[in-house]
Image (tube, helix red, strand yellow):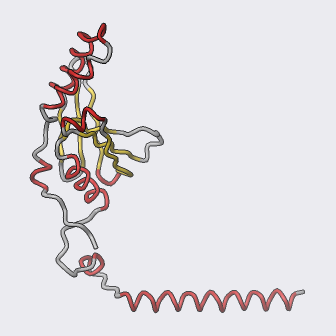
Amino acid sequence: MTTPAPADDSILSITRPHGDLMKYYLLASFVIPPLFPLLMIVGAIRYRTMRYKFTAEGISMSWGLLFRKEIIIQYSRIQDIHLRSNMVERWLGLSKVLVQTASGSASAEMTLEGLKQFEAVRDYLYHRMRGVQDEAPGESPSARDGAVVGDDELAATLRAVAAELRALRADLAARKDSDA
C-alpha cells in the first residue's frame, strides 16, 4: 500500500531556505571566535543567494555570489534521501535533506538546507523518484498502464516456468548420464 503523495503545491512553492537558517549560520559562526566575521559573511552570502526550484522533471539548487554553483537532479536519478540535523538545527526546527545519486561519490550530490518542511520534502522526493502517481483507490499500477495481470495469473505463469525449468534440468541430467 502506498502512502498518499504530499501536497505538491506546498513543495513546489519552496524557493528559498527558511529565515532560521540565517540564525543557524550566526550561531555556527561563534564556534571559532577569531573567524566570526569571515564565517558570518560567508554564511550571509550563502543564505541570500541560495535558491531551490522543484519542477515536474527534477529539482535544482543554486547559490554563490562570485562563483555561482547550480545543481540540477532529475527525480529518476535519485538513489537515496537522508535527513540530517544537529542539535542546534533541531532546536531551530530545521533539517538538511541529503539527496544522493549513483554518481559514484559517497557524499550527497545535493544538500537542501534550512527547510522546516523537511519530512514533506523527503516524502515528495521519494514519491517522485519511485514514479508513484496518484492512483485511484484499489487500482493497481499494472491496471493503470493497461497491462492487466492478476496475482493468480502471475502465480500460474511462475509455476509453469518453474515446471519447465525442472523438465529441462531432468532432460540435461538424462543426457549427461547417457553420454557417460
Quadrant of residue 30 within the rendered picture:
top left
Question: Residue drawn 24% across and 17% down?
Answer: 42
Q: Nearer the viewer, residue 111 or 159?
A: 111
Q: Nearer the viewer, residue 36 or 146?
A: 36
Relative to residue 134, is residue 46 depicted above or below? Answer: above
The quadrant holding residue 103 is: top left
To which quarter of the image does residue 35 belong? top left
Seen at 60% across and 90% down, the residue is 164
Out of 179 and 82, give the one closest to the viewer.
Answer: 82
Q: Indicate left or right for 146 with 22 as reference.
A: right
Give above or below for 93 relative to 139: above
Task: Work out which quarter of the rendered image holds the C terminus and state it.
Answer: bottom right
Give the quarter of the figure containing the N terminus: bottom left
Residue at figure coordinates x 79%, y 92% from the top left: 174
x and y, in percent, of residue 124 in the image: 22, 55
**Is 95 rendered above or below residue 126?**
above
Q: Which residue is at 26% across, 57% downward?
A: 128
In this picture, is 99 found above or below 176?
above
- Image position, residue 106 (x, y; %): 46, 40
